[in-house]
Image (cartoon, rainbow, N blue to C red):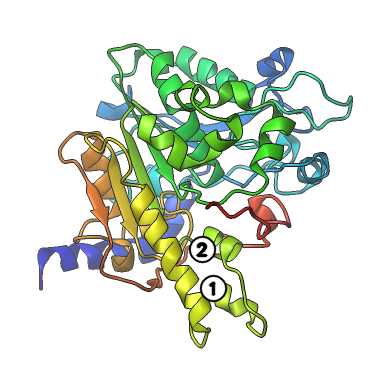
Amino acid sequence: MKMGSINQIVALVYIVFHGLQAMANAPDLIKLQSAVANGAVCLDGSPPAYQLDWGKEEGAKNWLLHLQGGYWCTTTEECRTRMNDSSGLGSSTKMKSSYFTGILSNNRTLNPYFFNWNRVYVRYCDGSCFTGDKQESAADGPYYRGGRIFSAIMDELSELGMKNAPNVLLSGSSAGGLGAMLHCDRFRNHLPTFTKVKCLSDASYFVTLNNPSGFVELHGSATNLPVSCTSKMDTTLCLYPSNVVPDIQTPLFLLNSAFDTFQIAATIRLPAGSTRSCLYNLTGCPTTVQKQWKNFRLKIMQEVTMGNLSRRGLFINACHTHSQSEFQSKWLGDPNSMLDHMTISDAVGKWFNDEELIQLIDRKHRFPQQCVLDASEPNACNNYTWGASHLCNVEQVN
């Protein structure tokens, strides 16, 4: 048996028998009351929040910031629904502490590169991928202040020690990953030149978006979108990774599935007579639907290689899944999530440490691979944990 196979088995066995111990780590929710005076508030006006697990030993000076995902809202009605929803995606008053797993785990075996860093989970409650900055609002909300939230929490963490960090990784999943991507260069400039800064964007390479023009206008996001993009084209277009990624100067790692469940479910056009099961399973589906799945895969694989690749990390697998960095089974363990016998954890860690320029794309599997689902992982579409009931109503990008 190959050593890689043995390591996979060891990791899976560890996850099965020690997973509950790892899941027990749920740091307290910290609400940043001081941010309210500067208008950095959630949709309902409550203070922004984050969770922090302090580092230790040789990792005690390094910082990892992970932005929570949860889609977005593009109309006042959607944002109002979100701020009153029990998910906490629009109000810190409804948030509960989340478990730290995957890239946030404090377990050396399950997260060997970042387990002892200062790990921060920046909670998402603005509905704008941390980009909004509109002063005017109704007295009872919604307030569109995601960009201010990002700045306020970054300032807070800087004072807690991040400004002296030798290594910092800004990461995020889904909407949080898009936020990490959009803020990447600005975040790099926020820290001293001696700090090594890199960014990780997980499940965030959106080829379709729901009402991007409404998004930018409603939240006042234009000032927080990358100038490298807005100086060349309409701000609405600067929400699309294909228009942003090629000009990002800070080293960026793109982690994505070529069969992303969220985007597949949101973009596939079902012909008459087809069932919604074809959004999740190709078995028995017409060739027109299968072709759409294949075209989505090809589009993802083409776009992630646009621009200068000299420092960009890539890990594009065929898992039929959405986020992968937060969920332990895919971060480290599930063989179907691996590429060239390498786990996502190893790929990101080696890339960050400049041990190897990781650029792995699964060109072998033309159909999705079923990967292990963690118990806490949400479904792809029509799930309120991702923010709204209109998830499958998107605009096709030509």
Q: Helix, strand, or loop for circle 2?
A: helix
Q: Which mark is residue 261?
A: 2
Q: How far is the residue under mark 1 from the one under mark 2?
A: 7 Å
Identify the residue at horizontal 42%, vertical 29% (top origin): 54
Q: Nearer the viewer, residue 374 or 365?
A: 365
Q: Which residue is mark 1?
A: 280
- Type of residue at label 1? Tyr
Residue 389 relative to residue 197: left or right: right
Name the image quarter holding the N terminus. Answer: bottom left
Identify the residue at horizontal 89%, vertical 24% (top origin): 139
Q: Residues within 10 Å of mark 1 (few under 14, many from 20)?
A: some
In which quadrant of the rendered view does residue 116 lie?
A: top left
Relative image position of residue 354 (x, y in whole percent) = 18, 34
Residue 394 relative to residue 116: left or right: right
Q: Nearer the viewer, residue 276 or 155?
A: 276
Identify the residue at horizontal 53%, vertical 64% (top origin): 264
Residue 235 relative to residue 298: left or right: right
Relative image position of residue 71 (x, y in whole percent) = 62, 47
Relative image position of residue 296 (x, y in whole percent) = 45, 62
User: Marks 2 and 1: in contact by CB < 8 Å?
Assistant: yes
- The answer to whether residue 77 of the structure is visible from this angle is yes
